[in-house]
Image (tube, grey):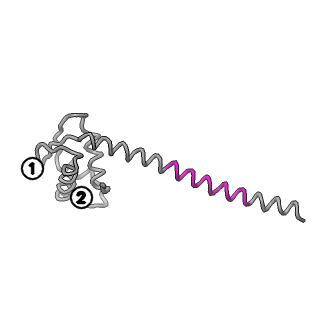
Amino acid sequence: MLDERCMALLNYVVCECNEGSFRVFEVGELIGAIPKKYKPDQTSVKICMDYLNKCGYLIIKYKDTEKYCVMPNSNAYEIIENSSQKRKNDKKLIKFGILGYFLVFFFAFLGSFLAKIIMP
């Protein structure tokens, strides 16, 4: 399971790379891809990139302290697509929950109103 830092980094790499090609990223670019609330630095980028490589989401052809040459694997495209699909499903469930809440409130109010009219 990927945490938010690795997921943001993977999403950035997938968006920047053409399918099936390697691309060279500077560490500064990758630091900018990680959310600021995690206070990203060179070490966190190294940890995330090594983890993504170990899990088979990225292929690292070359790396040093300033640059990474990477290509996303087919697993990376799959997990990005699944996460976007999950977000869409979560939004639908939230909308359905809110609609259900208001329908229950409306029918409870309607029932008590009709009871008050029928039973004086």
Placement of 30 over or under 41, stated as above or below: above
Identify the main secondary structure in magenta.
Answer: helix
Q: x and y percent of residue 37 in the render?
A: 31, 60
In this picture, is 4 found above or below 78?
Answer: below
Q: Which residues are magenta?
A: 91-108
Kindly identify the amino acid type of the residue bearing the numbered disc 2. Answer: Pro
Q: Amino acid at mark 1?
A: Asp
Mark 2 vs mark 1: in front? 1
Q: Is residue 102 magenta?
A: yes
For this orientation, the residue located farthest to the right is: 120
- The image position of residue 42, as x and y in percent, is 17, 56
Q: Quadrant of residue 19?
A: top left
Q: What SS does tag 1 mark?
A: loop
- The reply to whether dot 2 and dot 1 touch (C-beta < 8 Å) is no
Residue 11 location (% of width, % of height): 30, 46
Q: Is residue 40 magenta?
A: no
- Mark 2 neighbour class, 10 Å CA radius: few under 14, some 14 to 19, many 20 or more: some
Q: How many numbered marks does the figure carry? A: 2
Q: Nearer the viewer, residue 46 or 93?
A: 93
Q: Secondary structure at mark 2?
A: loop
Q: Distance from label 2 to label 1 (Cα)?
A: 18 Å
The residue that disc 2 covers is 40
Whichever of callouts 2 and 1 sits on the residue coming sooner in the sequence is 2
Residue 6 rendering spot, x and y as whole percentages? 27, 53
Q: Residue at x 16, y 41 (%)?
A: 24
Which of the two residues, 97 or 74, is positioned nearer the viewer here? Answer: 74
- The residue carrying pointer 1 sits among few (fewer than 14), some (14 to 19) or many (20 or more) residues within 10 Å by Cα, namely few
Residue furthest to the bottom in view is 120
Taking the spot 12% from the left edge, 42% from the top edge, the residue there is 61
Q: Which residue is mark 1?
A: 64
